[in-house]
Image (tube, rainbow, N blue to C red):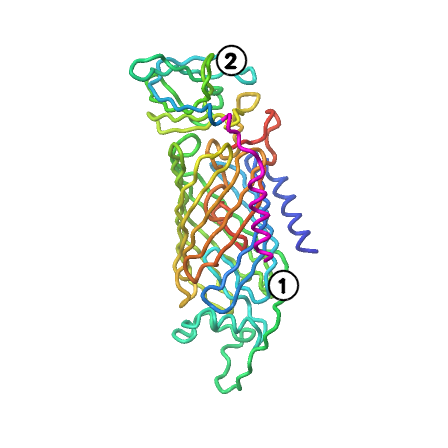
Amino acid sequence: MRMQRWIVCLAALLLVGASKEELRSSLVTVEGDVLTIDFRPGEGGLDLLTVTLRGRDDGEPVALLLAPKSALDELGFEIAEGDRLKAKVFSSAEGPAKVHKVQNLSRNTILRLRTLHRIPLWNGTGGWHGGPGQGAMGGPGGRGPHHHGGNGGPGR
Amino acid sequence: MSDRLSLNGLLLLLLCASPALGGPGELFILAGLAQGAYGTETDSDVQATRLSFITGDTLQLRADLGVLRVRQDSLLLSPVGPIPPKPRGPKGPTSQLSSQMAPQAQGDSGQGSGQGNGSGSGPTPPDEPFEAPIVEEAEWQTGLGDLRLAASHRLLGGGAKVFRLDLGAQVKAPTADPDKGLGTGEWDGYLGITSEYRFWTATGFGGLGWNYLGDPEWVELNDVVEGYLGLESEPLAGRWIVSGWFEGNPEVIEGLGSRAALGFGLRTAGKLRWRLLATVGLTDAAQDFSVLFGTSFGVATPTVGTRGPVR
């Protein structure tokens, strides 16, 4: 009986916190080859790397607002013209679309740049601020059994 | 009281050492319970409150310490399966537990866990008159758990790479009191590799390693390999991250069998991160279930930015 109450309390705590439906609904996935690389002011007044992708079937080019070059360099995320990118972006009617997550298919790299709440994962000076996980979704101690850093059992 | 002082002292030491160890880190505060019968007639109950601290990336360091509350006749929960606690008396509950836990070991090899009769005095002589066990409510024991210190080094990938491979080592210092049934009182070690591969919508992860298990005087433990393999989702519905994995290892005590368990994880992204982890045993050598709930947050993070670590 005491166990059941405990489990119910845990479930209730986990269910606290409303989902952000309006944020999720604005996400779209784009893919294409990099045409141009440029910089333009973005969050925090920093110059952010901006790339233009060739549109699908030679359609309209798509502009993406990435992150400060210093933050990308810190994690080893490189982009060159001709690279093929896949990105999940917050759709935008004006200007380049802010990137939530980007994968460079030509270089086998992947990075999440903003949370689903559009919060950038770099700090005010352009350094990476996504925690010690260095761009991994989980970071340290996030996955698997506890004794390997994943917190998988109380008695261990 | 001394346990609490030790725990607080370690926490303070880790927090102070964080910048020297490589910058920001993450502190986990976790509470949970585990229960299992292990195919025997004896239940095992363990409750734990744990502190874990992790810092570094390419070179990552981790410390883990908890306060345990265990029922007097509970088996010790090691990462590779249950271990009988130190015997307390010639007719105490532990001797019954040991014989229930590994009946084959007693009958076949004579070297298994079934030697736990008396305080290291050997098996009960066969001509001793049988005395029926006295059934009484088991007491609970509380105390400091074992201290685990781990380090891992990035061998391949990491950063923005989709692939990562780390080599890791761990030492268990016997800070838990074996007389209270909280630990074996012996040093343990682990050496292994962990890896992950990030797909577009999920991350696969796994590990393979070897455990050296120090033998307490009342039972002989096999050194075993162990492995796990799982998958974790991207954040769902804004912040929920779901994972599942399979873990297992060969038998640690002869006659007890191999351990296999399924794990399930649910955690949140954000500044203050919550996590719920549970395992369900698939074999008798695994605890029937365990639940762990806690939170984690960044410590010693840079003060330049306007946000804490957000993942």
How many marks overall? 2
Q: Mark 1 belongs to which amino acid?
A: Trp
Q: Where residue B10 appears, x then y in whole percent?
A: 63, 47
B17 or B261: nearer the eye? B261
Quadrant in the picture for the N terminus of chain B: bottom right
Name the image quarter holding residue B21: top right
> Does A12 appear in magenta?
yes
Per the image, label 2 sits on a secondary structure element best described as strand
Q: Which residue is located at x 39 percent, y 73 percent?
A: B109
To which chain does the residue with label 2 belong? A
Q: CA distance from mark 1 to mark 2?
A: 62 Å
- Which residue is labeled 2 in the image? A41
Q: Mark 2 belongs to which amino acid?
A: Pro
A47 or B134: nearer the eye? B134
Q: Where residue B251 appears, x then y in whole percent?
A: 40, 62
Q: Which residue is located at x 55 percent, y 71 percent?
A: B94
Which residue ends up furthest to the right in the rendered image? B1
To which chain does the residue with label 1 belong? B
- Which residue is labeled 1 in the image? B140
Q: Which residue is located at x 50 percent, y 61 percent?
A: B36
Query: Any mark on residue B107, and which?
Result: none
Q: Where residue A23 appears, x then y in whole percent?
A: 50, 26
Badge 1 density bin: few <14, some 14–19, many ≥20, Cα 10 Å = some
- Say above or below: B254 vs A74: below
B221 or B36: nearer the eye? B36
Q: Where residue B117 appears, x then y in whole percent?
A: 52, 75
> Does A106 appear in magenta?
no
Which is the main secondary structure of the residues drawn in magenta? helix
Q: Which residues are magenta?
A: A1-23
B150 or B301: nearer the eye? B301
User: Of circles 1 and 2, which is in front?
Assistant: 1
Per the image, label 1 sits on a secondary structure element best described as strand
